[in-house]
Amino acid sequence: MIFFDNILQGFQVAFQPTNILFCGIGVLVGTLVGVLPGIGPAGAMALLLPATFQFSSTSTLILLAGIYYGVQYGGSTTSILINIPGEASSVMTCIDGYQMARNGRAGPALAIAAWGSFIAGTIANIGLMFVAAPLANAALSLGPPEYFALMCTGLIIVTYLAQGSVVKAIMMALVGIILGSIGLDLISGMPRFTLGINELTDGIGIIPLVMGLFGVSEILENLEGNLKRDIFKPRVRNLWPSAKDWLQARWAIVRGTVIGFILGILPGGGAVIATFVAYSVEKKISKEPERFGKGAIEGVASPESANNAAAGSSLIPLLALGIPPNPIMAIFFSALLIHGIQPGPLLIKEHADLFWGLVASLYLGNGLLLILNLPLIGMWVKVLEIPYKLLFPLILLFCLIGAYSINNVVFDLYVMIFFGVMGWVMRKFGYEAAPLVLAYVLGPMLETALRQSLLISGGSFLIFFTRPISAISLGVAFLLLLSNLLPYFKKQRMQYDQVKE
Amino acid sequence: MKLYDQASSLFWLLASISVITESLRLGVGTLHNPGMGFMTFSASGILGILSLSIFVRASLQKEIVKREPLFSGGMWRRVFCVLLALTVYSSAMPVLGYLISTFVLMTVLFWVLEKKKPGLVFASALLSTLITYFVFSKWLNCQFPDGLFGL
């Protein structure tokens, strides 16, 4: 009964006029960000966060969740219509989505992407309701060693899934930990690594950091290239998949949802990797794999379902354990802290209205997104035609306002510019920003958990291996690290065989 | 990538050495009672080792593909222009106030990519400045600096 009371309470919170408005703004901005390459969900969330200070924490989270969801929907539009993924989580949709559009089937492609997203998002919400609360209860028995091990595993998975060099990704995670330690020491209260700058006593703000690494660096990179896009203008009609389309896509949606949901929960997982796995699985088990890459509807349904399911389930580790599993959730984490809420296992109990209100708003957001993305598809196609030379000054201005308005200090603007340049140079040298941001947020928690664990154990690292959860978690992390050496051994073996022959 | 990997790994190696030095100054403590510099010392130690490994691997590698220049063409001038504008804006905003400094910045940014008609550039800059001012300052209560002229 309590469960149903909570759900009812959640809908009462979500259907308050302010929260409906925030949900609407969130999904609208999210779709816009998804459609327009150049700012990304992390940047958009960071931008709107300062504007929410005068509103409640529930409204703020509803807005941020709307953006995150909206981006997953909007990203598919550009992938299908112009073969440019609005977001990294829509890369796989390009492969078959664009081919469908080329074959005159842009309508069914957009429709199955939207319906797949809607179904997956709804199922993920149901999963979130059933999994988060019991997990939070179980997490109450976890101590600092378990938290340390889980966070380490999360960081290792993020680096393992890096698109480039794993070593470089680990290096970025370490840089993130070091940057996260700037400011007052959590235990002694003394300043460290502040270089004598007063503004650094509170540490580097996450908003200027994210704005710089994701927003400004992306703009700088785009400014170097050719800014003119070739837009293929397909005729978008029949925005309803045929019975045959539904039959072909139905299991792809189910599989995409399951894969996305599981990978979203895992620390280090998220929407991007879920789409890659979902697409690969779909192609592998298909009876006609040769259709993939030529406009197979399953190739659109599966990744689109996966990214929405992952978006929903990645809220689970954050809300139940207080551990953000990816950089986007790190922004959520910061938003909670800014609003005076400590993320962790007690969050669901102590802020039931926030949790259940957020869950209910996800249903509302999903419904709104379906309306935004199908009947209003023409509007998003028009948005794609806005020239970049007009967009980039506005995006930069929004970044500046977002970074400044957090603390109303100019120093944050310098921080944003610094990290913008750093992110731009990092891209050139093949270093990724995602592990840095996640480690930056997890760093202080990781340090506290490590120091507490060592204090408990009297300085023995064995504490991490004598407790089952931390031992298993660190074991998985170690195996993942070890698996990076496999290609090296394989290469050595091949060279040895060649010499032998 | 050989030269880029060598250069970047050297940079991170130097960074890790400076963090190690500072961590030691702060106090690493003991395993029983870790100090303020314990975590950063460990992190920068591993960072240093990994940087060194990248440097060695890059040095031993044969460059097969011809290296592409980091700053191709003349487009990097745009980037430099934008960065200079942003830095000047950050310094000027507390003095000149939000409205004037943002108007100047937007004029420069709209002009950077394409030499458009001055009227169009000024109109776009003015419109974007005023809209953001009213939305963020008046509606969302963000506190922008007024500057010397009270604008």
Image (cartoon, rainbow, N blue to C red):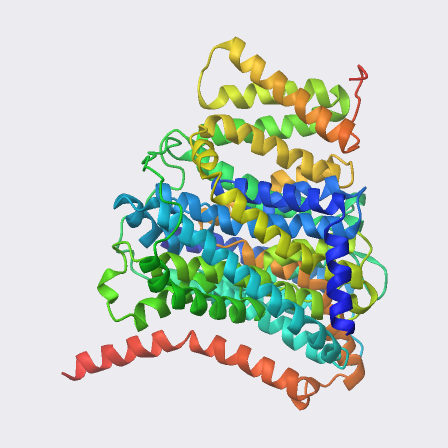
Quadrant of the frame with the C terminus of chain A? bottom left
Instruction: Please determine whether, in this image, residue A467 is positioned above or below residue A156.
Output: below
Q: Toward which corner of the image does residue A52 lie, by quadrant?
A: top right
Residue at the limit of the structure toward the front, as seen here: A243
Relative vertical location of residue B19 with respect to residue A236 in this rendering, above or below: below
> At 73% across and 74% down in the image, what residue appears?
A136
Q: Residue at x 61, y 29 (%)?
A: B86
Which quadrant does the N terminus of chain A fall into? bottom right
Residue at point 31%, 59% (across, down):
A244
Q: Is residue A62 above or below residue A473?
A: above
Judge whether residue A355 can be spotted in this image: no
The furthest residue to the right: A189
Q: Is residue A141 visible?
A: yes
**Horizontal side of residue A394 vs A306, given as left or right:** right
The mark tally for this picture is 0
The picture places residue A164, in percent across and down from the top left corner, at 42, 59
Q: Position of residue A212 (x, y in %)?
A: 60, 43
Residue B118 or B69: which is nearer the viewer? B118
In the displayed structure image, the side of residue A332 where residue B78 appears, left or right: left
Residue placed most toward the observer, A480 or A119: A119
Tell me where residue A63 appears, x and y as whole percent.
67, 47
